[in-house]
Every structure is written in C-alpha cells, then in structure tokens.
Image: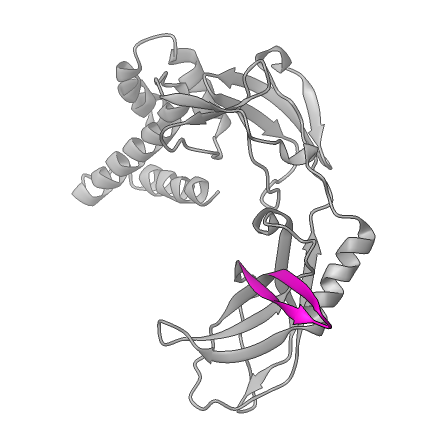
Amino acid sequence: MKIKITLLFLFISILSFGQEKDSTKFKEIEFAEKLTYSINSEIFTQKEYKTELDKEYKLPWNSDFYTDKQINQAIDTLINNATIKIAKGSFSNYNLTFNSYFPQYIDNRLIDIFKLSIKKNNISNNGNLLDIQTSGNSGFGSHSESGFKNGNSYAYNWKTLNSSFNIKTAIKKEEFKGSVLFESGFVKGYDYQKISIADVGKQMKIGAYEFKVIDVINSSVILDFKSNIDDLDFKFVNLNKEGYRIIASESIFSSMTLFNDQYQLFKKTRMYHLKNLRKRFIRNTWS
C-alpha cells in the first residue's frame, strides 16, 4: 500500500509539471516508470525456479489446536510467573520487557500460534506518560529442571517467553510509576481457501472478506477484494497435485497492491515481447 501511495503522488507531480523541461521532473518520471515496470513485470514474467517438495510440511489448518481449558491454564501460568522491567536497550533507547513461561504441554509452535501485545499503558516517567510500542518482539526458549525428591527422580521442561517493547520517550532519570495491561492469545483455527486456475472468475470468501479470482499467472494469483484488506494477515502455500508443499530455492515476491489499469496493460501485452512494454507503458500512462 505504501508503494501505491508513493506512485500516486509521483503521477500527480508529473501531470502538474508535464510542460516543464526541468531535469528533476524527468528523473521523477524515469524513477516512477522503472519502479512500476519492475514491480508489475514480476507477476507476468515466466521464470524458472529450482524447487523441491516438502513432504513433511503440515498445513496449519490441519494442526492440533489447544482446547479452551489448556489455553486458559497456559495464560494463568504466564500471569502467575510474569516479571516486568524497564531497562536500557542495545541502541541507547529503553525497552519494557515481559518474561514468563508456559506449562509443560505447550510445544515449539509458539512463534506461529501465540501473540502478546500491550493493550493499555499507564506508566509514567517524571510525570510524563511513556510512549511504548504496543507490538513487541517475542522470543521463545526453554528452561529445564531435574533432580530427586522423596526418593523419586523428576524432570521438567518449560517453554519460556521474552517479549520486548520499545519505549519511544526519551528517559533522563530511571523513575517509573504506573501499570501496563497486556493482551495475549492463541490461534484456535484458520480460515483458508483453495484456489486453482479453474476458479478464475469465481467469487470467494475467506473469513469475513469477499473477493473475486481475477487470474492465475505462473505462480501468482490476482485477487480483487471488495473491501480494504490492510488488516488482513494472509499467506499463500503452493501445493502440487498430491498436496505436498512446493518450496522455491530463492525468495519470491509474496504480495503487492496493483492498480487495475496497470494490470490490464500488462495482461494485454504478456503474450508479446515484454521488452517492448516499457515504451507502451510510458505512452499509456502519461499521454
């Protein structure tokens, strides 16, 4: 979405000063053209990637999820064993850190299924309310303990949680007062939708979001959502006919926002030589 806004302002600037022979404006045109062409052509360019099959991969929606009872117990354990402190970070700024641990039945999938954030902050420093980032960086580790008690051996292993939240306020004197309210939760399921080339033109729905499948090009899926999806967190998983996950050997562009007129222009020319598209793109955009 940031790219979309930037390009829009560049187009306005170019249209407003199109008659000027200023070299700066020509550079803006060239920059906008190269950037837009580069981004959009990724979708329509056929590339050969080295791929492999991950036969051990388990689709997230086929995973075993914790029960409500287990989740409530896990959160109670976090609360009862939590410690909070404010200390100087690595880059001279201050951080608020939350440390605790989970019950033993919580496994290693925490990075995908658990989230912790700050819901409300009332901590002040010298009378000034601290500006603390609501989303933090969470790390998960483990803590083990073993020994003998009453003639019997025991061994425990807990998953630990360390979450750090950046404090934007400048701290001159380490005197803090107040409270902070955290919000946490576990993933209990996923909304998912299977999309193939046979679905082009169909209306579909994922969660509360409705969309139309516009096209399937190479490894790209073009979707038209009826509402804003800035808050929608979704990912794509490529599967072969047997249902195994396909992994590329190099990073592939995941998702982007595409203007309809740009999509239509690239779609019309994808069957021709893509190298001739840049000249046509300039003429259609700024003529």
The quarter of the picture where residue 273 lies is top left
Relative side of 65 to 194, left or right? right
Q: Residue furthest top?
A: 271
Q: Nearer the viewer, residue 44 or 23?
A: 44
Residue shown at 43% from the left, 22% from the top: 52
Q: Is residue 166 above or below residue 25?
A: below
The location of residue 99, given as percent across then percent down, is: 58, 70
Residue shown at 38% from the left, 33% from the top: 251
**Count of number-bearing discs:** 0
The location of residue 279, given as percent across then percent down, is: 27, 20
Location of the C terminus by quadrant is top left
Residue shown at 65% from the left, 37% from the top: 227
Q: Residue furthest right?
A: 69
Q: Nearer the viewer, residue 48 or 74?
A: 74
Relative side of 94 to 56, left or right? left
Residue 151: in magenta span? yes
Residue shown at 62% from the left, 31% from the top: 59
Q: Nearer the viewer, residue 94 or 268?
A: 94
The quarter of the picture where residue 271 lies is top left
* Magenta range: 141-158
The quarter of the picture where residue 117 lies is bottom right
Majority secondary structure in the magenta region:
strand
Q: Is residue 5 above or below residue 116?
A: above
Residue 152: in magenta span? yes
The location of residue 171, given as percent across then percent down, is: 44, 84
Q: Is residue 228 above or below residue 183?
A: above
Q: Nearer the viewer, residue 90 or 211?
A: 90
Q: Is residue 28 above or below residue 163?
A: above
The location of residue 229, given as percent across then percent down, is: 61, 40
